[in-house]
Image (tube, coloured by chain):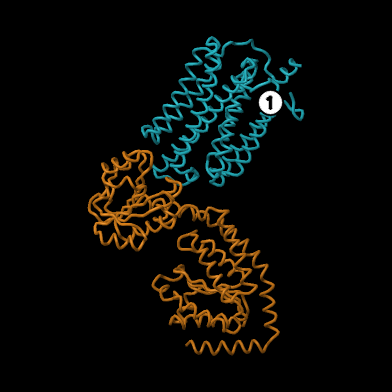
Chain colours: A orange, B cyan
C-alpha cells in the first residue's frame, strides 16, 4: 500500500554503534550530492537532512512509501552501505511520531549527552540548509518552526539543560561560579594532551581572556598554543608565574605533583583578593591536595568533576518524564495543524491512479538498482 | 493621619505582608521548582517598598519629620533602607537568592516591629529639636544600617558560595548564588558605601555636638563612633588585603550583629529625653489638631 506521509528515517547513536555511524556519516560533498539527488526523487515533496556525529536523519513529506524507500536507497548507494542492514538498524517514524521525534531531538532529549543544547543549533542549521536548497515546503516549514518553539519551551520550562554533563564544561561552569565571567580570566594549561586541550577549548569557547600553554616539551606547547591561538610558556616558569593566572588546568603525565602547596601559597600572597582555581585532570595528580586548604583557592580533581557531571546527568534524567509530557502535548497540537495538508496529499494521491502507478514504477526500478 | 482611610500602620502591615509574600513565594519556588523566582520576588519587594514608603510618609507628615522616634520606627526605617538598596542592585542579581534573603530580612524586621506593640506604644516627639541637620544625621545613620543589613545578606551568600565550592556541592540551591568574586566585589562596595554614609552622618552630627557638647550623651557618642570605626577598620583591612574571603564575610556579619545590638543603648541614651506621649500617629495628629 502506498501511503503518503510525513516521515523521518535515519540512524542514531541509540541504534547504531560508533563504528557503524562512521560509515553512515555524510561528508560535506556527499551530503550536497545526495541532497541534489533527493530533489529528483519522484513523490518526495519536501525534505531536510540532519547530519551530526551522532545521527543521520532524513525528514520529509512523501507522496508514497516508495518515495521514502528511494531516500533510503539513494543514501545507502552514496555511502556504499548495505541497504538490508540499513533497513534493520534504521528508525522509521511517520506523521505525529515523526513530529514528536523532531521536537525530542531539538530539545536534546534524544542526545547522547542528555539535554545538550548544541543539537538545537545543528537542527536549525539543517533546516536553514534545506530552505536554501528549496527542499522545504509548507508542511516542513511549519513542522520545523513550530518544533523549534516547542523545543525551546521544553528547555525553558524544565531543568533538562541545567548543570553541565561533560567534564570540560563542568570545569568551565565551576570557573563561572568563582569568577562570574571569563572575560577577565587568564587560563594556564599545564600539559599538551587531549584532555587538557578539550578543557582549554571549552574555556576559550566561553570567552576566556587569555590562554597560555606550558608543557614539559616546549615544542609541543608551542604547537598546541599555535593551534589554539594561545601563547606558550616554558614549563619551568609555571610556579614562578602562577600568580598571573586565574585558572590553572593541569593535565600532564608527570609522575609527581607539578604545582606544590608552597608555590600556590606564594602565588596567593601576590594576589590575595583574587581567587585561584585549579583543575587537576591528571593521573597521578598534578596539584598537591593541601592546596585546597588555602583561603580563596579552589581545587577540583578528575573525580570531583566526574562526580558533578554525573549528578547533573541524574538530575537531567529526573526531568525526562516532565519533558516527554510537554513534547507529547506540543507534538499532538503541531500534528493537528499539519495533518490536513498531509491528508490532502493522501486524498489527492488516492484519486490519481496514474500517479500511483508511476510512483510504483519508479520505486521498483530504484529497488532493483539498489540491489 | 490617614490615606485612603487607612492609618500608617495599616499600610505598614500591608507592606510587611508583601515582604512576607515574597519570602513565602521564594520558599515555595525553591522547594517546588528548585529555583528562585527572581522577577516575582523583585515585584513583591517593590510593591512592599512602595506601601512601606507610603506608611512611613504618612507617619513622617504626622510627626513633622523623619519617623525615628522609637524602636518600631527604627526597625521600619532600617528595613526600608535595605530594600531601597536591593531594588537598585537587585536588578543585577535578579535570578539569584539575594531577593529571597532581602524579602526574608525585610519581613522579619517589619513584622517583628509590628507584632511587638510595646515598641510603638510611645515615641519621643521633637527629638531633633526642630533642627533639620540632626534629622539628616539620624536618617543617614539609619540608612547606613540598611546598607550594612544588605552587606550582611551578601556576606551570608558569600559564605554559602564559599562552602559550596570548597565542599564541592554546587548543584541545587547553591547554583542560584552569584559568583564568589561578584559577591566579594559587591560586599566591598556596600561596605564602602555604608562607611561613607555613616561618616557623613557623624560629620553632620558632630557640628551640632560641637556647638553644645551637653546635648549628646557620651555613651551614645562612643558607641556610634565605635560602630563606624569598626566598619572603617574592616574596610581598611580589606582594601589592604589583610581581611579577605571568609574572614571578611564573618567580620561583616559580626559587625552587623554588634551594630544592631548597639541600637538599643544608642536609642536609650538620647539626650534630652522628652516625656513619653501616645505613639499612635493618628492620636498624635489629633493632639496636634
Residue B15 place in picture, x, y as percent: 65, 32
Q: Chain of mark 1?
A: B
A257 or A4, which lies in front?
A: A257
Say if A222 sits above or below A82 in the image: above
Residue A281 place in picture, x, y as percent: 32, 53
B182 or B138, which lies in front?
A: B138
Residue B109 place in picture, x, y as percent: 58, 28
Residue B85 place in picture, x, y as percent: 56, 35
B166 displayed left or right of B32: left
Q: Is residue A12 visible?
A: no
Q: Give the quadrant of residue B20.
A: top right
A63 displayed left or right of B186: right
Check the picture and name the quadrant holding the C terminus of chain B. Answer: top right
B191 or A38, which lies in front?
A: B191
Residue, disc 1: B9
Q: Residue at x 70, y 28 (%)?
A: B10
Amino acid at each position: 500500500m502506498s501511503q503518503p506521509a510525513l516521515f523521518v528515517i535515519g540512524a542514531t547513536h541509540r541504534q547504531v554503534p560508533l563504528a557503524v555511524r562512521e560509515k553512515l556519516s555524510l561528508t560535506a560533498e556527499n551530503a550536497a550530492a545526495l541532497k541534489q539527488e533527493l530533489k529528483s526523487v519522484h513523490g518526495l515533496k519536501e525534505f531536510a537532512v540532519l547530519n551530526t556525529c551522532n545521527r543521520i536523519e532524513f525528514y520529509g513529506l512523501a507522496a508514497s512509501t516508495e518515495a521514502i524507500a528511494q531516500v533510503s536507497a539513494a543514501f545507502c548507494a552514496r555511502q556504499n552501505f548495505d541497504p538490508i542492514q540499513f533497513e534493520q538498524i534504521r528508525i522509521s517514524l511517520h506523521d505525529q511520531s515523526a513530529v514528536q521525534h523532531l521536537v525530542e531531538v531539538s530539545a536534546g532529549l534524544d542526545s547522547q549527552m542528555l539535554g545538550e543544547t548544541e543539537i538545537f543549533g545543528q537542527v536549525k542549521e539543517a533546516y536553514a540548509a534545506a530552505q536554501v536548497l528549496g527542499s522545504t515546503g509548507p508542511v516542513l516549514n511549519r513542522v520545523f518552526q513550530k518544533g523549534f518553539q516547542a523545543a525551546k519551551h521544553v528547555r525553558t520550562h524544565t531543568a533538562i539543560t541545567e548543570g553541565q554533563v561533560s567534564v570540560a564544561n563542568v570545569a568551565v561552569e565551576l570557573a563561572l561560579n568563582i569568577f562570574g565571567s571569563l572575560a577577565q580570566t587568564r587560563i594556564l594549561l599545564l600539559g599538551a594532551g587531549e584532555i587538557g586541550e578539550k578543557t582549554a577549548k571549552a574555556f576559550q569557547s566561553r570567552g576566556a581572556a587569555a590562554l597560555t600553554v606550558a608543557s614539559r616539551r616546549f615544542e609541543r606547547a608551542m604547537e598546541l598554543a599555535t593551534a589554539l591561538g594561545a601563547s606558550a610558556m616554558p614549563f619551568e616558569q609555571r610556579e614562578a608565574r602562577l600568580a598571573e593566572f586565574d585558572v590553572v588546568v593541569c593535565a600532564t603525565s608527570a609522575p609527581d605533583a607539578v604545582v606544590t602547596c608552597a608555590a600556590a601559597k606564594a602565588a596567593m600572597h601576590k594576589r590575595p583578593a583574587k581567587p585561584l582555581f585549579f583543575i587537576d585532570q591528571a593521573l597521578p595528580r598534578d596539584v598537591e591536595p593541601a592546596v585546597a586548604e588555602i583561603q580563596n583557592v579552589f581545587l577540583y580533581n578528575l573525580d570531583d568533576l566526574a562526580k558533578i557531571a554525573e549528578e547533573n546527568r541524574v538530575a537531567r534524567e529526573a526531568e525526562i518524564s516532565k519533558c516527554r509530557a510537554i513534547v507529547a502535548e506540543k507534538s499532538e497540537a503541531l500534528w493537528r495543524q499539519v495533518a490536513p495538508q498531509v491528508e490532502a496529499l493522501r486524498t489527492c494521491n488516492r484519486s490519481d491512479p496514474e500517479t500511483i502507478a508511476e510512483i510504483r514504477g519508479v520505486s521498483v526500478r530504484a529497488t532493483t538498482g539498489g540491489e | 493621619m490617614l490615606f485612603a482611610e487607612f492609618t500608617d500602620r495599616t499600610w505598614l502591615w500591608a507592606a510587611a505582608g508583601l515582604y512576607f509574600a515574597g519570602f513565602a513565594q521564594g520558599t515555595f519556588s525553591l522547594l517546588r521548582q528548585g529555583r528562585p523566582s527572581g522577577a516575582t520576588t523583585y515585584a513583591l519587594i517593590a510593591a512592599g517598598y512602595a506601601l512601606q514608603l507610603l506608611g512611613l510618609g504618612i507617619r513622617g507628615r504626622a510627626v513633622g519629620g523623619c519617623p525615628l522616634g522609637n524602636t518600631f520606627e527604627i526597625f521600619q526605617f532600617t528595613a526600608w533602607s535595605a530594600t531601597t538598596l536591593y531594588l537598585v542592585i537587585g536588578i543585577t542579581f535578579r535570578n539569584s537568592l539575594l531577593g529571597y534573603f532581602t524579602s526574608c530580612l525585610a519581613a522579619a524586621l517589619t513584622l517583628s516591629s509590628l507584632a511587638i506593640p510595646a515598641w510603638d506604644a510611645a515615641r519621643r516627639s521633637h527629638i531633633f529639636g526642630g533642627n533639620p541637620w540632626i534629622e539628616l544625621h539620624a536618617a543617614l545613620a539609619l540608612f547606613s544600617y540598611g546598607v550594612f543589613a544588605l552587606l550582611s545578606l551578601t556576606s551570608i551568600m558569600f559564605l554559602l558560595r564559599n562552602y559550596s565550592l570548597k565542599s564541592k556541592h554546587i548543584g541545587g540551591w547553591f547554583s542560584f548564588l552569584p559568583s564568589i568574586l561578584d559577591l566579594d566585589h559587591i560586599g566591598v562596595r556596600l561596605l564602602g558605601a555604608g562607611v561613607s554614609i555613616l561618616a557623613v552622618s557623624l560629620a553632620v552630627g558632630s557640628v551640632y555636638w560641637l556647638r553644645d557638647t551637653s546635648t549628646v550623651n557620651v555613651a551614645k557618642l562612643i558607641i556610634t563612633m565605635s560602630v563606624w570605626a569598626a566598619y572603617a577598620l574592616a574596610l581598611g583591612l580589606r582594601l589592604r588585603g589583610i581581611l579577605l574571603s571568609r574572614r571578611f564575610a564573618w567580620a561583616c556579619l559580626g559587625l552587623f550583629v554588634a551594630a544592631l545590638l548597639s541600637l538599643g543603648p544608642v536609642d536609650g541614651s538620647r539626650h534630652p529625653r522628652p516625656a513619653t506621649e501616645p505613639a499612635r500617629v493618628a492620636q498624635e495628629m489629633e493632639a496636634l489638631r
